[in-house]
């Protein structure tokens, strides 16, 4: 057995859907059992936060409503008790 098998990298994807005015988030290969899905504006202010559960296989899916959020650039952050992943996106 090879003990030097590299760990798989976390998959993280966040995209803005202008028709639904919502950000969709998918992640897999996460470590941990619980976490937080957060949205920050480019000045570092927390705009949205939601607790999430990491299901078997390290999967998280979620949505962030953008109805009360102005157009601009945002940082989507998913943090678990073991790691953190982020992605920038634009609401237009």
Image (cartoon, rainbow, N blue to C red):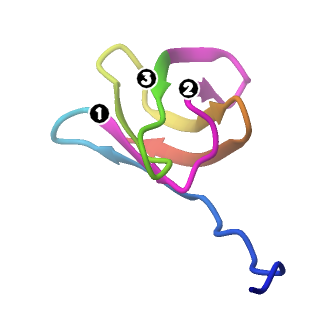
Q: Is residue 44 left or right of residue 59?
A: right
Labels 1 and 3: the sequence-earlier one:
1
Labels 1 and 2: the sequence-earlier one:
1
In the rendered view, tell whether residue 21 sits above or below residue 67: below
Residue 8 appears at what percent x and percent y? 64, 69
Who's the residue at 24% across and 42% down the image?
A: 18
Which is more foreground, mark 3 or mark 2?
A: 2
Q: Is residue 91 left or right of residue 73?
A: left
Query: Which image quadrant: the C terminus?
Result: top left
Q: Which mark is on residue 22? A: 1
Decide which of 25, 91 is in the foreground and name it: 25
The span picked out in magenta is 22-49
Q: Which residue is mark 2?
A: 34
Please identify the quarter of the rendering in which residue 17 is found: top left
In the rendered view, tell whether residue 46 sits above or below residue 27: above
Furthest residue in direction bottom, as rendered:
2
Q: Which residue is mark 3?
A: 70
């Amino acid at each position: 057995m090879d003990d030097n098998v590299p760990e798989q990298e976390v998959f993280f994807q966040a995209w803005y859907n202008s028709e639904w005015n919502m950000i969709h988030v998918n992640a897999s290969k996460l470590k941990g059992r619980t976490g937080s899905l957060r949205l920050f504006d480019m000045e570092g202010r927390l705009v949205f936060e939601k607790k999430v559960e990491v299901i078997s296989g390290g999967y998280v899916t979620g949505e962030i409503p953008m109805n009360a959020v102005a157009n601009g650039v945002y940082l989507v952050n998913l943090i678990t008790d073991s790691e953190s992943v982020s992605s920038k996106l634009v609401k237009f």
